[in-house]
Image (tube, coloured by chain):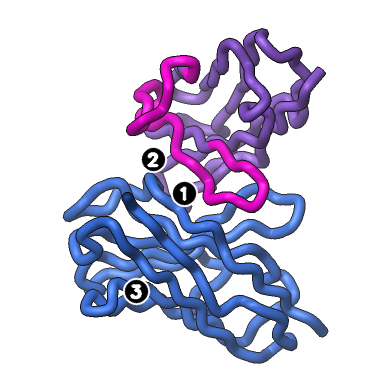
Amino acid sequence: EIVMTQSPATLSVSPGERATLSCRASQSVSSNLAWYEHKPGQAPRLLIYAASARATDIPAKFSASGSGTEFTLTISSLQSEDFTVYYCQQYNSWPYTFGQGTKLDIK
Amino acid sequence: QVHLVESGGGVVQSGRSLRLSCSASGFTFSIYPMHWVRQAPGKGPEWVALISLDGSEKNYADSVRGRFTISRDNSKNTVYLQMSSLRLEDTAVYYCARDSASGYIQYLFDYWGQGTPVTVSS
């Protein structure tokens, strides 16, 4: 099973600044990596697929990069609604696994 | 727009059964594979089960295989998860999710419901 490790577990950033979240796979997942945003009580939302492609209606403030085992999600010009939890997920090989999440906090 | 609504969650004793439902709207349900994903308290999400667009292919996480059964009724735009022999570790919020790939299976989830909580008690 591919283990997805996200860091840091909690990231404190000031509104208006940029946040950089990391996701590491225990073995290569090629570019089959997705990022999701999950606000409490809401449905999770797909942000990024294929490691760097924005999903439908996702604003350009969300960008991502990486391949193989190292991936990054960058969120620029942070606003209040961005302070929530983000998960990465690999869909390269079964079982298709998620990271434990990074909680983005207001500094 | 795409809308997924789960129902059927609740508190159930260990060893008992429960059936979850997910009602879909806003898209052509019959051409998309569907999944169930769960999230236990304090943990990341865990993929649970998949059903292909016509129900001919099903797949399960090892943790639920033999105890959970996924099914769908394309005439009702609904996917189900029958959970049997429930264990304490099955306690989680259960989400249904649409596979992003119509016509084939990618295990990439482009739309999710808000989830239904399941608590297994001793």
Residue B30 seen in this snapshot: yes
Q: Which residue is mark 1?
A: A96
**Can residue A31 be seen by looking at this rendering?**
no
**Label 1 packing within 10 angstroms: few (<14), some (14-19), many (20+):** many
Query: Is mark 1 in CB contact (under 8 Å) with mark 2?
Result: yes
Amino acid type, mark 1: Tyr
The span picked out in magenta is A37-62
Task: Supply the letter of whichever chain is purple.
Answer: A
Q: Are marks 3 and 2 in contact (CB under 8 Å)?
A: no
Is label 1 in a helix, a strand or a loop?
loop
* Residue A59 in picture, x, y percent from top left: 42, 22
Q: What label does residue A92 carry, if any? A: 2
* Residue in the picture at 44% in, 67% down: B60
Residue B10: quadrant of the picture: bottom right
Q: Colour of chain B?
A: blue
Residue B78 — which label? 3
The answer to whether tags 1 and 3 share a subunit is: no
At horizontal 34% and vertical 74% (from top left) the residue drawn is B78
Q: Residue B67 in the image: x percent, y percent?
A: 53, 82
